[in-house]
C-alpha cells in the first residue's frame, strides 16, 4: 500500500503562493513590525526583494548583532549594519526610530558618539514621529546636535541620557 501524499502547506491556495500575491504596502507593514535586522534578512526571499528599504519603523537593538559572544566584534558589526541600512533606506518619512544600546555596547568603538549623532540626525531628517534612544550600560552624554528641532516629533524618549 502506497503512503498518502501530504497536502501542500497552508500558504498555498489553489496551487498559488498567497504571500506573493499580497500588495507591497501590506508586506512593508509586516516588515516594519519586525526588528530591522530581521526585515533586512528578508531580502533573500525573492518576493520581498528590497521592500526592507521602505519600512516605516526602524528598530535597532545592539545585542541582536552579537556573534559568537565576541561583543566588541558584534558592536562593530552593529555600527556598520546601522550605517549601511540607513544609507540604503528609501522611505522619505518614518514613523518610529528606536535605538537600544544594551549593556554590552560599552565595548564599542570610541567614536561611537559620531555614529549615534548621525543616527539621531537621520531620524530627525526623516521626520520621525517617535524617537526612542536607550543606552543601558551607564549614563550617556548625548552629542551636541546642531538644529535639534523637529516639527513632526511627537514622542522623544531618552533613557540614561543627558
Image (tube, rainbow, N blue to C red):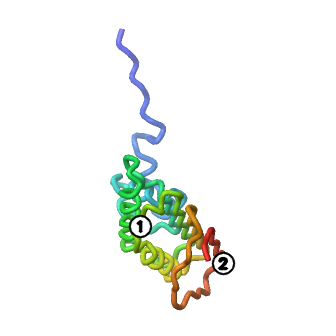
**Pointer 1 residue:** 82
Residue 60 image position (x, y, % from top left): 49, 63
- Which of the marked residues, 2 or 1, is nearer the chain's N terminus? 1
Query: In the rendered view, would you say 88 is above or below 10?
Result: below
Badge 2 density bin: few <14, some 14–19, many ≥20, Cα 10 Å: few
Residue toward you, 7 or 29: 29
Q: Residue furthest top?
A: 1
Front-lying residue, 155 or 141: 141
The residue at 49%/83% (across/down) is 125
- For label 2, the residue is 154
Local SS, label 2: loop
Q: Residue furthest bottom?
A: 147
Residue 92, label in figure: none
Q: Quadrant of residue 8?
A: top left
Crowding at dot 1, Cα within 10 Å, few <14 / some 14-19 / many 20+, comes out as: many
Look at discs 2 and 1 and give the one toward the viewer: 1
Name which residue lies at 49% across and 81% down.
Answer: 121
Which quadrant would residue 161 be assigned to in this image? bottom right
Residue 151 in picture, x, y percent from top left: 61, 87
Left or right relative to 157: residue 21: left
Residue 44 versus residue 14: which sits nearer the camera?
A: 44
Q: Quadrant of the C terminus?
A: bottom right
Q: Is residue 111 left or right of residue 134?
A: left
Q: Quadrant of the N terminus?
A: top left
Total marks shown come to 2
Query: Residue 53 lies in what quarter of the image?
Result: bottom left
Q: x%, y% of residue 138?
A: 57, 65
Instruction: Classify 140 as above or below 150.
Output: above
Give the spatial CA distance, label 2 vs label 1.
Answer: 23 Å
Per the image, label 1 sits on a secondary structure element best described as: helix
Amino acid at each position: 500500500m502506497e503512503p498518502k501524499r501530504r497536502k501542500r502547506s497552508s500558504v498555498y491556495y489553489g496551487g498559488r503562493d498567497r504571500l506573493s500575491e499580497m500588495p507591497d504596502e501590506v508586506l512593508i507593514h509586516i516588515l516594519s513590525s519586525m526588528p530591522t535586522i530581521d526585515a533586512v534578512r528578508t531580502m533573500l526571499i525573492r518576493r520581498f526583494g528590497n521592500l526592507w528599504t521602505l519600512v516605516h519603523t526602524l528598530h535597532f537593538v545592539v545585542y541582536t548583532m552579537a556573534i559568537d559572544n565576541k561583543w566588541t566584534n558584534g558592536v562593530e558589526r552593529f555600527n556598520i549594519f546601522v550605517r549601511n541600512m540607513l544609507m540604503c533606506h528609501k522611505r522619505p518619512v518614518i514613523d518610529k526610530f528606536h535605538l537600544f544600546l544594551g549593556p554590552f555596547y560599552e565595548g564599542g568603538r570610541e567614536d561611537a558618539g559620531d555614529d549615534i549623532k548621525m543616527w539621531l540626525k537621520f531620524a530627525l531628517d526623516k521626520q520621525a514621529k517617535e524617537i526612542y534612544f536607550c543606552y543601558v550600560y551607564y549614563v550617556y552624554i548625548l552629542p551636541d546636535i546642531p538644529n535639534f528641532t523637529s516639527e513632526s516629533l511627537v514622542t522623544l524618549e531618552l533613557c540614561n541620557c543627558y
